[in-house]
Amino acid sequence: MKANSYCLGIESTAHTFGASIVSSDGTVLSDVREVYAPEVGKGIHPREAAQHHSQVAPEVLQRAFREARVKPNHLSSIAFSAGPGLGPALRTGATIARALAVFLRKPIVPVHHAIGHIEIGALTAGARDPLVVLVSGGHTAITACADRKWRIFGETEDITLGNVVDSFAREAKLPSPGGSAVEKLALEGKKFIDLPYTVKGNDVAYSGLLTAALKKMRDHNLEDLCYSLQEIAFSMLTEAVERSLAHTEKKEVLLTGGVAANKRLQSALEVITEEHGAIFYVVDPKYSGDCGAQIAWAGLLAFKCGLNVKVEDTIVRPKWRLDEVEIPWRP
Amino acid sequence: MAPLNTASFTLIRKGAEANLYLGEWYGRKVIVKKRVEKKYRVEPLDKKIRAYRTIHEAQIMHEAKKSGVPTPTIYLIDISDFTIVMEYIEGIRLRDSLNDFSLEKRLRTCRNVGNLIGRLHERSIIHGDLTTSNMIETLDEKIFFIDFGLSLYSIEVEDRGVDLHLMKRALNSTHYRYVDQCFDAVIEGYEAEVGNEKTGRVLAKVREIEKRGRYFPERV
């Protein structure tokens, strides 16, 4: 049997600085992360996030190696999140990855953050060729791989589902992370408040919904509003997914990304997946949020196909479309 | 009126929002489109959406036909059952055939599609879900547009732009090998119907809408 190889993944697109070591047999040997938390009622500040990342980096990296019981010299490659994300945060992670790669003389692999979400989802849930529903702070996209690229079947035309929930939570002065606070309050909601529902083909648009929900904050109790906001936002996405599923006739659906942890969204998507005779998969909740493991695993897949770059070419790309990236490891 | 009995009908397709049944109705071959309950939606929202789209789809399909765009003839609407009975169109969805066409036939088909979209837009109709799944080509090369559930009346450049953006998206995801030639041909057909001045404005809008998508480099 061939010996396992190991990849170190460094994630630093937004709130999270993460480091993880995965083995080529698909085992996550360690996954360590520290999350920058802005004050309640405030959003993420890119420069402060970057400062946070550089402060926690040494300890996070040390723990990642220690927990994995892998020595730096035994790595076969080093992967980092090259985008999309916040410039200062991305550059912090990239700088650390470059320094390690040069010092250890290891190949360096840039990874698209969303592909990390997809691949760690497919790995941990066991999906092979799914229609992917990627929901996070940075993405809301419905995508499937064909001819070595992720083809976008539907996406948000303005803000993401993560943005809707986070912005609403922030204005409502709910503690961070906003998603779980809104989900919890929604369970107490009873009255359904009508809010704008916008589906355009397989696309959704959320800005009208968010604005309307914020406006109604004065006249309604927060539980009912969280409930209605979630119901409308998830119904819109579920409808768009069902349209894409009917169109692509895929046999698997994979839900991944930070918002994938939401139980209500899971149950809505599960219902339609079963109706169309497909199998529903969800990313392991340990890895739904941003983490080093998603970068390490996607980096390892890419490196196995011979993908790596010279250190001088490791530019970060704050804006980088998912559908631009070549995926040589998928059919 | 008693709800239509679909027991003798065969389910031929489970679409995204409706089940399609094939059967005979007064000696005609018909499709029954039934908007089924969506358990993922809360009931008030679900009922509102199903009732609205059933009525609306039937109305706009009829209006589209008047604008010269082939659509199945509506025979009956039953709002209590969220059901439309319509003419059965014998043909193949472009989703399944477009990639296998010869270049010449593919371009001709796309020009034809663009022309039909132009006719809808000229009559203030926005289809709302332009994918090749929603276009059926008959043996005599007539293209029928179906699935008007998301359609709307509008003369806004924005809505026209979204319509063409969705068309391009469908080509990009399902017919990616031919997306450029196909979309160019769609636009050629569109322009022949609405003129180059309007086409220019709508195309500029399409580019603007594209950039609203996540992480396009030019997005501000």
Image (tube, rainbow, N blue to C red):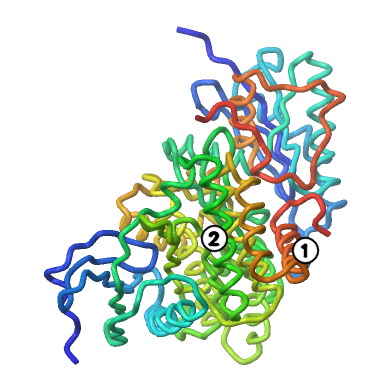
Q: Quadrant of residue B51?
A: bottom left
Q: Can residue B183 be seen in this view?
A: yes
Note whether A320 is above or below B135 in the view shown.
above
Image location of residue B114, percent across then percent down? 59, 61
Q: Nearer the viewer, residue B22 or A36?
A: B22
Question: What subunit carries mark 2?
Answer: B
Image point (77%, 22%), residue name: A309
Question: What subunit carries mark 1?
Answer: B
Which label lies toward us, 2 or 1?
Answer: 2
Q: In which quarter of the image is residue A102?
A: top right
In the displayed structure image, the side of residue A273 where residue A65 appears, left or right: right
Point out which mark residue B113 bears: 2
Q: Nearer the viewer, residue B111 or B50?
A: B111
Q: Nearer the viewer, residue B136 or A111?
A: B136
Image location of residue B186, percent across then percent down? 61, 57
Q: What element carries label 2?
A: helix
Which label's residue is closer to the chain start, 2 or 1?
2
Mark 2, other Cα within 10 Å: few <14 / some 14–19 / many ≥20 = many
Q: Quadrant of residue A120?
A: top right
Image location of residue B144, percent across then percent down? 43, 65
Quarter occupied by the C terminus of chain B:
bottom right
Q: Is mark 1 on a helix, strand or loop?
A: helix
Amino acid under disc 2: Val
In the displayed structure image, the side of residue B39 where residue A113 appears, left or right: right
Point out which mark residue B32 bears: none
Image location of residue A300, percent across then percent down? 61, 25
Q: Can residue A135 be seen in this view?
A: no
Note whether A220 is above or below B21 in the view shown.
below
Quarter occupied by the N terminus of chain B:
bottom left
2 and 1 marks on the same chain: yes
Point out which mark residue B204 bears: 1
